[in-house]
Amino acid sequence: MPLSLEIVTPRTAVAPRTVRWVDVPAASGRLRILPGHAALVCELAPGPVTAVGDDGVETTWNTGAGTVRVSADGEVTLLVRSAEARR
């Protein structure tokens, strides 16, 4: 069961995408979210967010501080101050 990732900033939103996993900079350290992860809400520190899509392609965004929410059905939402895809 894949995850659905959405990154939301005050100015824009990254279209939801289906991913295999997401790695985020939680305030207490790195957190990798896999399918079946328990529901949670936690604080994010500024830093890189990396996800691997269903196609196996890895994408990384530089993000500002914020919050991540993981729902029981695999929806991962990042509410962050900024997000810029790395090239």
Image: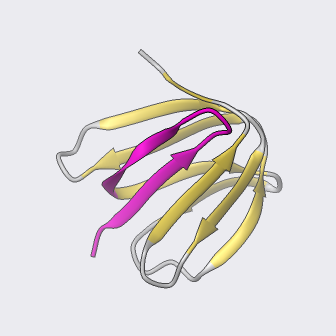
**Residue sitting at 43 percent across and 74 percent down?**
74
Which SS type dominates the magenta stretch? strand
Is 3 included in the stretch rendered in magenta?
yes
Q: Residue furthest front?
A: 11
| Image-based side of 45 in relation to 74, left or right | right
Percent of width and height locating residue 35: 39, 73
| Image-based side of 61 in relation to 15, left or right | right
Percent of width and height locating residue 56: 22, 45
Position of residue 46 relative to residue 7, above or below, is: above
Q: Residue furthest top?
A: 87
Position of residue 45 relative to residue 63, above or below, is: below
| The C terminus sits in image quarter | top left
Position of residue 65 relative to residue 28, above or below, is: above
Percent of width and height locating residue 36: 43, 81
Percent of width and height locating residue 78: 60, 53
Is 16 included in the stretch rendered in magenta?
yes
The mark total stands at 0
| Image-based side of 15 in relation to 80, left or right | left
Q: Residue furthest left?
A: 55
What are the residue bounds of the magenta stretch?
Answer: 1-19
**Residue sitting at 46 percent across and 69 percent down?**
75
Colour convention: secondary structure
| Image-based side of 40 in relation to 65, left or right | left
| Of 60 and 5, the residue lying toward us | 5
Residue 69: quarter of image: bottom right
Position of residue 21 relative to residue 8, above or below, is: below
**Residue sitting at 58 percent across and 46 percent down?**
8
**Residue sitting at 27 percent across and 76 percent down?**
1
